Image (spheres, rainbow, N blue to C red):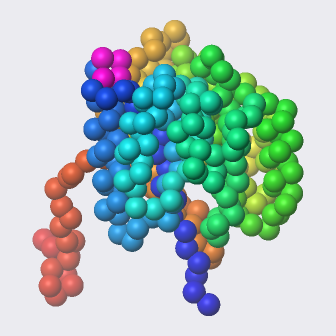
Amino acid sequence: MADTQFTLVQISDLHIKAAGQLTYKVVDTYHALQQVTEQINRMVPAADAVVITGDLTDFGRDDEYRQVRQLLDTLQMPWFAIPGNHDDRQAFCRAFADKSWCPVPTPALNWVNDDYPLRLIGLDSSIPGKPGGRLDTQTLLWLEQVLQQAPDKPTMVMLHHPPFVSGIGHMDRQRLENPDELQKIISRHPQVIRLLCGHVHRYMVSTLGNTLVCTAPGTSHQVAPDFSAGGAACFVLEPAGFLVHRWQASQPLVTHYLPVGNYPGPWPFYDENGQLID
């Protein structure tokens, strides 16, 4: 029997503004995302799905969602999204009401998708009006129930706010408030093979208990890597990027970081005789 494979692309922190506006009066997030979607569409073989781990817009306004929807609809594969602290739940639901993964507005916008060999669970960690995150009691109970329904299916859980300390002070002051409650649930369900987050605008890898956690870089600007006490909340225009999570039934999940851009190459390592080029 063929070794079942599944490829999930993760993008995050799009921060799209209304048409013609720059984010923080500096960053052209619209054209940055356009470059990302074009690069994803050029992947060979094509990805099976794309997930956006929050902050699709900068202020959660309807005109911003219209802009982001215009770009996301150019993706040639199914895509899913969860809200971040820069999103607005009501506007989010208006923008994506036709999507099967977008629930009726409730205190939290959580969803599960069972269409793939890898189960996808999206959690809403946003707190309206606040930059930090929290998984409310309803979400935690829902997550426990959903995980109990498919104990043998490999699963990835997605939320915007990372459940670990990054070392970047201003981001750590707005991280997930209750990681211990999430860890208690995840520890009971070993089918969860990865947690995917955004928010910190950098590629980071940590753990929650025994489960690996990955954060995706931003699709445009990145948070400055200032690890000093009291470091200022600043961003830098490092190359943007996204993550590619490749799973196959016979192997562990592998995560690749891909920078965004057109780079020289590819060139061969070996000549026409199979010899390493000297």
Residue at 30%, 53% in the rendered image? 38
Q: Quadrant of the C terminus?
A: bottom left
Q: Quadrant of the N terminus?
A: bottom right
Please name whichever residue, 251 or 47, is drawn nearer the observer in this view of the structure: 47
Specify the principal SS of the magenta part.
Answer: loop
The range drawn in magenta is 21-25
Quarter of the image holding residue 182? Answer: top right
The answer, for residue 235, to whether it is visible in the render is yes
35 and 17: which is toward the camera: 17
The percent position of residue 83, horizontal first and vertical second, equals 59, 35
Q: Is residue 212 left or right of residue 63?
A: right
Q: Position of residue 20 (x, y in %)?
A: 27, 26
Residue at coordinates 19% horizontally, 71% vertically from top-left? 268
Query: Does residue 57 lie above or below 109 as drawn?
Result: above
- How far across and how far down the image is residue 76, in percent? 40, 61
Is residue 24 in the magenta section? Answer: yes
Q: Quadrant of residue 116?
A: bottom right
* 22 left or right of 7 in image: left
Residue 181 image position (x, y, % from top left):
82, 35
Q: Is residue 136 above or below residue 145?
A: above
Q: Is residue 235 magenta?
A: no
**Residue drawn at (21%, 71%), measured in percent from left and top?**
269
Location of residue 111 with respect to 166 vertically, above or below = below
Does residue 236 show up? Answer: no
| Residue drawn at x 79%, y 30% as measured from the top left | 136
Q: Is residue 144 shown left or right of residue 31?
A: right
